[in-house]
Image: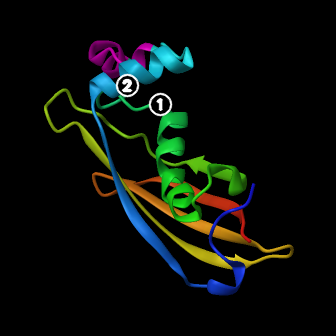
Amino acid sequence: MAAVISFADVEVGTELPAGSFPVDRATLVRYAGASGDFNPIHWNERFAREVGLPDVIAHGMFTMAEAVRVVTDWAGDPGAVVDYTVKFTKPVVVPDDEQGALVEVSAKVAALLEDNRVRVDLTATSAGDKVLGMARAVVQLV
């Protein structure tokens, strides 16, 4: 399937609506159950600190998935994302309080490609730190 956005309606520099995604410990437990990733750095504060982390951290794949929601929401069809890559630069630290953490994502069209495809570059931060680097999605438009 393709996005509902028309290739003719975008240009390099087109900004996608930004997104903010809260992450708390309960979310991490649910994600662990869904993904099968029960690494204790994602739920056990004592263990996370023993291995040198500041606190429990969000799963990298969870962070990656939350970030691309900005692109899929804009495109109107998750299946329009035909390629997506990131480098994990810093972990999303999730304190054990009511607020948890917040992942903030912005994105813009960085290149017009062949066959009505565009490359979208994403910026994802949490607590002021860039948590994903080289985050890029290729989206098939109509």
Q: Residue at x 42, y 69 (%)?
A: 17
Say which quadrant the C terminus sits in.
Answer: bottom right
Say which quadrant the N terminus sits in.
Answer: bottom right
Residues rendered magenta in the picture: 40-50
Q: Residue at x 50, y 52 (%)?
A: 69
Residue 3: image location, x then y, percent: 66, 63
Vertical order, 122 against 65 (above or below): below
Q: How far apart are the two marked residues, 2 and 1, measured between alpha carbons?
A: 7 Å
Q: Quadrant of residue 56?
A: top left
Vertical order, 125 against 100 (above or below): below
Residue 49: image location, x then y, percent: 31, 21
Left or right, 100 with respect to 87, comes to: left
Residue 28 marker: 2
Tell me, yes or no, whether the highlighted magenta stretch contains residue 47.
yes
Looking at the rendered structure, the kind of residue marked 2 is: Leu
Looking at the rendered structure, the kind of residue marked 1 is: His
Left or right, 120 with respect to 103, comes to: right
Contact (Cβ within 8 Å) of mark 2 with mark 1: yes
Secondary structure of residue under mark 2: helix
Residue assigned mark 1: 59
